[in-house]
Image: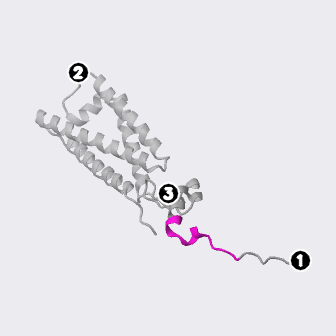
Amino acid sequence: MSSKPPPPLMKKHSQTDLVSRLKTRKILGVGGEDDDGEVHRSKISQVLGNEIKFAVRDPIGLRVWQFLSALMFTGIAVMALAFPDQMYEAVFDKGTVSSKTSTRLYGGALFSISLILWNSMYTSEKVIIRWTLLTEACYLSIQLIVTTVTLIESGSPTVAAAILLGCCLFFVLVSTYFYYQVGRRPKKL
């Protein structure tokens, strides 16, 4: 019996043909960029995710800032809900307000924002952190404008009102800074 020699080992053309390899990778969904600009090297990395996305580095001081913001909003909210007359007098120095309802509604709104700020401390999602920082910056910007216009109309600025305006401006600037820092793309190592 004569035995046939084994056929020569042949290379697959897909290994040498660049166009064929690119077509295969495209069909498998490998090698393209996703929404975040990440290039996946394999299907497994697409399914499991990229571990770099989970290792989010917070800007230095972000968590302390979130705590201070939540604490400030909660403190002012409790003061506006419990002591509306004193809250109004501290800012505008005009005596008692005719209706405590508006100051208490202000306290309720602040308390709602403070709950959002407290809950944002426990997340690592950049989108949620950015939205809470933007909410804080927008709210404080509006408060800064409204308080300034009210003081100009009344014509009697007080030291307490000046301190309030300075604090609002400071909080707006720091919240805006952290908003942009959290939104930056991390540097690739």
Which residue is at a point 43% across and 45% down the rendered structure image? 128
Which residue is at a point 36% across and 46% down the rendered structure image? 133
The image shows residue 102 at horizontal and vertical percentages of 28, 25
Left or right: 79 as drawn, with respect to 147: right
Residue 44 drawn above or below residue 100: below
What residue did someone put label 3 on?
53
Amino acid marked by disc 3: Lys
Amino acid marked by disc 2: Ser
Is there CB contact under 8 Å for labels 3 and 2?
no
The image shows residue 137 at horizontal and vertical percentages of 30, 45
Residue 10 part of the magenta-drawn span: yes
What residue did someone put label 1 on?
1
Tell which residue pokes out farthest to the right in this image: 1
Q: Which of 132 and 156 lies nearest the eye of the viewer?
A: 132
Q: Nearer the viewer, mark 3 or mark 2?
A: 3
Characterize the local packing of mark 2: few (<14), some (14-19) or many (20 or more) Cα atoms within 10 angstroms: few
What residue did someone put label 2 on?
98
Which residue is at a point 70% across and 77% down the rendered structure image? 8
| Sequence order check, earlier mark of 3 and 2 | 3
Q: Which of 38 and 86 lies nearest the eye of the viewer?
A: 38
